[in-house]
Image: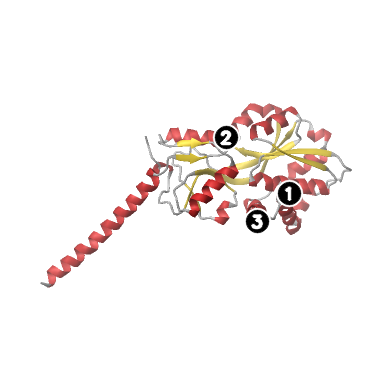
């Protein structure tokens, strides 16, 4: 009789293990099956281009929905509050990674790219016509943690403006600002115009640089533009510069189109990443887990 009891206990344990595994697999499958779309950002951006290329490369049975960063984030937050499945195009640095537990889906085919850098670009001739501004923009460089520090101050508190968050960061990091401005002579009211896209990452960097330029005596204008229009405006000389070009992937199409009409000063931030992002409660880890045709 004892051996029968032992066998019964062993069988029961095995059944529980198999049931748990089955539940995990079902949960995984449900997370994937419930995904009908990937919520994107502005149409025409490099991010949307590689997102569609990824959908095609993995033969996914999902649509790519154009949106904007604010609208996409609203959908993401709503889904998280209701613990619903959602996939979005997102990037790091981004304050949402400090507010919520998010994860990038693995991309075995590397169609979403790997490490991204954010480049500073200026109009041709700025180095000769406005050397102080050119040198400051060329010297500007910071880390992912610096950008996240600025973003988190205004993105999570509606009472804090990006300019105020940038001013606080500058006050807390005088040594970094000193390195950017070392040897630069102040000017007297010279005008400079910078373009930016309405993303929190670019609001952070552009406001920091604008305040440093103002401290050097510049009259700074910040102009919000779509990515493509920003490239066109810098290429035509209407805008002096921008700190918004994610490369080698995010802004690749615009870089290729305007490459010989713009002065690329190189990265102001390295180690950025973009891809498909999901809340960590979703039981999927790879792009390959999404529904296929």
Is the residue under label 2 in contact with that under label 3 (CB below 8 Å)?
Answer: no
- 250, 71: nearer the viewer: 71
Residue marked by disc 2: 46
Q: Is residue 51 shown left or right of residue 11?
A: right
Residue 105 position (above or below residue 233): below
Q: Quadrant of the N terminus?
A: bottom left
Residue beneath label 1, please? 208
Residue 244 locus on image (x, y percent): 66, 40
Picture quadrant where residue 21 is located: bottom left
> Mark 2 or mark 3, which is nearer the start of the sequence?
2
Q: Residues within 10 Å of mark 3 (few under 14, many from 20)?
A: few
Taking the view exactly as shown, the residue that stands out farthest to the right is 188
**Dot 1, crowdedness within 10 Å: few (<14), some or many (≥20)?**
many
Q: Earlier in the sequence, mark 2 or mark 1?
A: 2
Task: Describe the element under mark 2 as helix, strand or loop.
Answer: helix
Classify 10 Å Cα crowding around label 2: few (below 14), some (14-19), many (20 and above).
Answer: many
Q: From the top left corner, tell me how far across and down residue 228 is, in percent.
A: 64, 31
């Amino acid at each position: 009789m004892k051996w029968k009891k032992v066998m019964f206990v062993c069988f029961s344990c095995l059944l529980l293990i198999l049931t748990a595994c089955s539940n995990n697999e079902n949960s995984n499958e449900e997370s994937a099956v419930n995904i009908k779309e990937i919520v994107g950002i502005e149409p025409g951006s490099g991010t949307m281009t590689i997102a569609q290329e990824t959908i095609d490369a993995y033969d996914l049975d999902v649509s790519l929905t154009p949106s904007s960063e604010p609208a996409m984030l609203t959908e993401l937050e709503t889904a998280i509050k209701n613990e619903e499945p959602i996939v979005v195009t997102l990037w790091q640095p981004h304050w949402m990674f400090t507010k919520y537990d998010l994860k990038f889906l693995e991309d075995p085919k590397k169609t979403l790219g790997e490490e991204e850098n954010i480049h500073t670009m200026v109009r041709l001739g700025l180095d000769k016509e406005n050397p102080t501004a050119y040198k400051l923009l060329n010297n500007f460089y910071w880390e992912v943690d610096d950008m996240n520090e600025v973003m988190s101050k205004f993105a999570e508190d509606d009472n804090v403006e990006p300019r105020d968050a940038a001013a606080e960061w500058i006050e807390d990091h005088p040594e970094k600002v000193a390195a950017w401005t070392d040897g630069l002579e102040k000017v007297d009211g010279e005008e400079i115009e910078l373009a930016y896209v309405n993303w929190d990452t670019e609001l952070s960097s552009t406001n920091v640089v604008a305040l440093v330029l103002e401290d050097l005596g510049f009259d700074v204008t910040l102009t919000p533009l779509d990515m493509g229009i920003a490239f066109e405006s810098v290429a035509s000389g209407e805008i002096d510069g921008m700190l918004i070009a994610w490369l080698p992937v995010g802004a690749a199409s615009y870089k290729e189109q305007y490459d010989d009409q713009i002065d690329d000063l190189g990265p102001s931030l390295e180690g950025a990443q973009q891809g498909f992002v999901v809340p960590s409660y979703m039981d999927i880890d790879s792009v390959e887990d999404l529904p296929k045709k």
